[in-house]
Amino acid sequence: MKELIYEQIDESLFETTLNNGLKLFVIPKKGFQKTYVTLTTRYGSLHNQFVPYGADDMIKMPEGIAHFLEHKMFEKEEGDMFNAFSKNGASANAFTSYDRTSYLFTAVDNIEANIKLLLSMVQRPYFSKESVEKEIGIIAEEIQMYQDQPNYRLYYQTLQGMYHNHPVKEDIAGSIASINDITADKLYSCYHTFYRPENMVMFIVGNIDPETIAEVVDANQYAVSDTAYFARTADIHEPPHVKEALLEQTADVQQPKLMLGIKAELHQLDQSLIQTELEVMFILDLLLGEQTAFYHELLADGLIDDTFGYSFTLEPTFSHLFIAGSTKQPDVLKARLIERLTHYSFSDEAFARLVKQTIGEYISSLNSPEYIANQFTRYYFNGAVLFDILPILEQLTLKDSLNTFSKIDLTRMTDSRLMPNG
């Protein structure tokens, strides 16, 4: 295995690529009781149109099939895999995002046995007509449950107002109509296209020996590729302007909920995604953070409460920011926010304090195996290494951050609202 040493944060990263193409990363953490393991494929809700393995023509799959496939991987002919992990003293889980599906477990002991179980589960699919039909009912209930939640409705209402064609506007779980089009054959097609070792990465962090663990992983490979295959997915053609400038629905809420969604288009910048993400979040913190006078003015004027918040999302094919909260005066709050986003100035000292605080939080987070594993895989799929954050933080400047933030066009905004019934 190749060892990379990060002296500044006192971390060692071991990496290797197995003969079948699976990428393996290991971070040994002496003295840690808990080990955290993830096995992730570069396949998420955005990848609905692709050329399947062994085919020539592009096909379109139902929305939500990546999430549906994640659910089905835990069901095998011999039983429920959650129970198998539990018997080994491990807590297992999985999640599907826009660009990846990750299977994971955390355990204190029986690490090798649980790694074998995880590899067996993910690399040996089993789908039947009966089990797929049963799962459709389960996920339909899950979708309905989320659609009854106001914050969930507001979030996807905003995305659907912002985007014309980009699949980010679709619910990761799909719709009740779309999941009814899912079949066992379609699941196998998605699986054999994207769940290939060369399209996956395994990450292990804990009190383990890298060489020993690498031997265990290598000896328990069920999916062997004769040739590497990386699926060709459909190009996304998305106009820069928003689809709808204003959306409003009624809902079972006590007072209006406002969400401003702004297309940032910053994924097109010629710089690392990590740097862009940090620069935008620092400016948003300086503009809207709880430590700012502006935030406390909004509170004092009764325009926001503790539901107020903001976020910035940056992925290889899209980027946007959200500002949201409950408010009795959505028009007034919107006007104040737009004024704040267009007229501001900050001192280098305030920026430096924020960077220093973030560096402290980042170093502290490296004591969490869960944080390291989940964030490492996310950054890896975006062409970066989690441990590269510190040097990037240290070279950030207020001038560069303001320059990046200034590229966000506020005219590309969707005003999305939920208003009280009646």
Image (cartoon, helix red, strand yellow):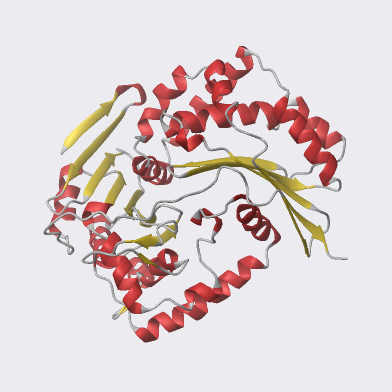
Question: Residue at point 57% right, 32% down?
Answer: 281
Q: Which corner quadrant holds the C terminus?
A: bottom right
Snapshot quadrant of residue 216: bottom left
Relative side of 422 to 263, left or right: right
Count how many numbered circles sit on residues in the image: 0
Quadrant in which residue 420 is drawn: bottom right
Which image quadrant: the N terminus? top left
Q: Residue at x 45, y 45 (%)?
A: 317
Q: Nearer the viewer, residue 250 or 268?
A: 268
Q: Is residue 155 left or right of residue 18?
A: right
**Measured from the top left, where is residue 180 in percent x and y?**
48, 78
Q: Nearer the viewer, residue 293 or 360?
A: 293
- Above or below 246: residue 193: below
Looking at the image, residue 354 lies above or below residue 136: above
Q: Is residue 28 left or right of residue 362?
A: left
**Residue 132 visible in the current orientation:** yes
Q: Give the quadrant of residue 390.
A: top left
Q: Measured from the top left, where is residue 261 in percent x and y? A: 65, 45
Is 289 in front, or is 21? 21
Q: Residue at x 17, y 35 (%)?
A: 2
Residue 90 in view: no
| Residue 109 drawn at (x, y percent) | 30, 55
Nearest the eye: 377 or 321: 321
Q: Where residue 343 sits: x, y (%)? A: 73, 23
Q: Residue furthest top?
A: 348
Compared with 226, 17 (above or below) is: above
